[in-house]
Amino acid sequence: MHPVDWTILIVVMVWIVYDGLKRTTDSGELEGYFLAKRSIPWWAAGLSVMATQLSAITMVGTTGQGYTDGLRFVQMYYGLPLAMIILSIAFVPFFYRAKVYTAYEYLEQRFDAKTRSLTSFLFLVSRGMSCGVIISAPAVVMSIILGLDITATAMLIGLPAIIYTIFGGVQAVTWTDVKIMVLIIGGLIATLVTLAFGLPDQIALSDALNIAGATGRLEAIDFKWNPNETYSFWSGTIGGLFLMLSYFGADQSQVQRYLTAKSVHAARHSLLMSAYYKIPLQLLVLMVGIFIYLFYIFSPPPLLFNRTQDERLRASGRAAEYQALEQRFTGAIDQRRQAAEQLATAERSDNAASIAFARSGFSAWDGEVRSIRQTATTMAREVSGDRNYSDTNYVFPRFILTQLPIGLIGLLMVAIILAATDSIAAELNSLSTATVIDFYRRYVTREATDAHYLKVSKYATAFWGVFASLVAIWAAELGSLIEVVNRFGSFFYGSILGVFLLAFLWRRAHGTAAFIALIIGMVTVAWFAFNTGVSFLWHNVIGAVTVFVVGIILSALLPGPRPSDPRDVAKAA
Amino acid sequence: MTLRPTLPSSDTVDPPIAHHYVLILIIQVIVLLGLAWLAAHYR
């Protein structure tokens, strides 16, 4: 990277941390530190909700998805708007008026201590691990792109988050999220505009879309019913609905974002912001990927976007095979470009026969390019021993570094790094909250001053920061761990949602029934995960429905404490 | 020690919000129709 870009990267990072800390007030009290004394405007809480979900994995992985597969990935979010409406109606008022710091605290008011502790414990384990993955996944990519050591890159991503979360609490996290979201959206729009204006003179925007459409990259709706397929309308609408309900309604890292809002109305508004803008934002990210694909039709792409893998293959015993593949690739790229130009000309002629002929020619050469890239990726996996290696993740960073003007490179690189940083900060903040409120204050020291709990909270944040960093370094060495963590998390995500649904919707439900139902739900999901090919999106549906139904049956069959009305819990608090 | 977070006084009245729910669902339908048109037009 050019020194100007390095300067931009460092200045922006320092300014983000400094300004986040400067805006922090009232963090000398527990309520200020964890909930900003409920003073955050709805739009800031809303941007924070969106920023927490948009990590560097989204920036790098989703643009890569757009490059290889087009818009189909967006289907995962079709259930999100309805999920936000349901949460806004059914969840937000209960959480807000129950005056809780954590979502799980509500479960003790409604059910019992063991249900609260188990759900909070599951949150701590899964989020603690996933926090490591949020650092390691982009650290692996960015270390290669920036030419830095992986530990140094992990520290560049994680350290600012640890610092401003420890000292600034939730206010620093929220106001930093706001600035980072502006930076990310601005950077993505600037990239898309640069790409659109960078098309060759003879290729109009409609020609470019015709070319993308010919490869199926503009197909964003697949109505085929197949529960094994993650990216379909039904999996996204039904499975995605339950995933988003779980994530935004039963996960402290999200619940805490909107608990900081000024009122129930403001908390609802902050959630609805995602309902309005999440799908357009995902479309923007994917469109950047599609336009990078179009860019590389008219400008030769590298065979592998990861330079380290490229160099490793050239130095390996399979160098001759790789060079031969590269020659084939160069020829196919040239043929594909000519076929794309012919397709654009044919589309303008309006002659159906010549359009069909040009389209089949282009599709054939595009298939050939894809197949050669696939062979190169397989070779990279075999030579490096990393069986999960995906070259897709390197498309966007490599494009930024080699094709964009100085200045924009620095801004986009810092946007990717900060996308990871802000997600980590929100996770650390919520991990610390759950540790202190659900365990330390509940089981260790019940009566102490705010100053005491604040000190413990800061230690807890530091502990989770170190834990996440260690997991990150470990995960970077064991690529498959990421898959394990994601799979592990999906076992109980939907099941925890089931407990909350039971709490809000079934008056007769009691703690013992909810606790046993939660365990049965997780076992059921694990069985489906290991014995069927059902997409992980459906795991959330299976978990939530199992816990809800089993909870209702057990509440009727088992003796339990007198059930408490969820509305009474909120009123009594 | 702050046992329970406090509720600000502004929380006493909930202004209507149902129109947002309707608007979000309408926009969702428009977005889906737009995406279907995009795929059909540039096939």
Image (cartoon, grey):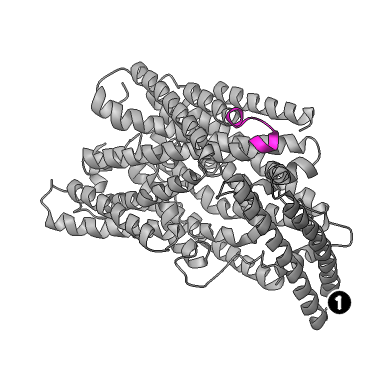
Near mark 1 (Cα within 10 A), the count class, few <14, some 14-19 or many ≥20, is few
Residue B21 as seen in the image, left or right of residue B38? left
The residue beneath circle 1 is A349
In which quadrant of the rendered image does the C terminus of chain A lie?
Answer: top left
Give coordinates of residue A292: x percent, y percent: 73, 53
Which percent across, then down, holds residue A14?
64, 24
Tell me if residue A47 can be seen. Answer: yes
Quarter of the image holding residue A315?
top right
Which residue appears at 31% of the width and 60% of the height?
A: A545
Indicate the secondary structure of the residue bearing disc 1: helix
Chain under disc 1: A
| Residue A38 is at least partly visible in this image | no
Q: Nearer the viewer, residue B15 or A45?
A: A45
* Magenta stretch bounds: A143-153
Residue A299 lies in quadrant: bottom right
In the current view of this chain or complex, which residue is farthest to the front?
A317
Q: Image quadrant for the N terminus of chain A?
A: top right
Q: Is residue A122 left or right of residue A306?
A: left
The secondary structure making up most of the magenta span is helix
Above or below — where is A555 with respect to A44?
Answer: below
Residue A556 painted magenta: no
Q: Residue A255: x percent and y percent?
A: 41, 41
Check the image and report above or below for A191 versus A425: below
Q: Which percent across, then down, holds residue A321?
A: 73, 55
Front residue (pair B12, A431): A431
Q: Image point 36% across, 62% down: which residue?
A: A531
Q: Identify the residue at horizontal 50%, vertical 38% (top origin).
A: A475
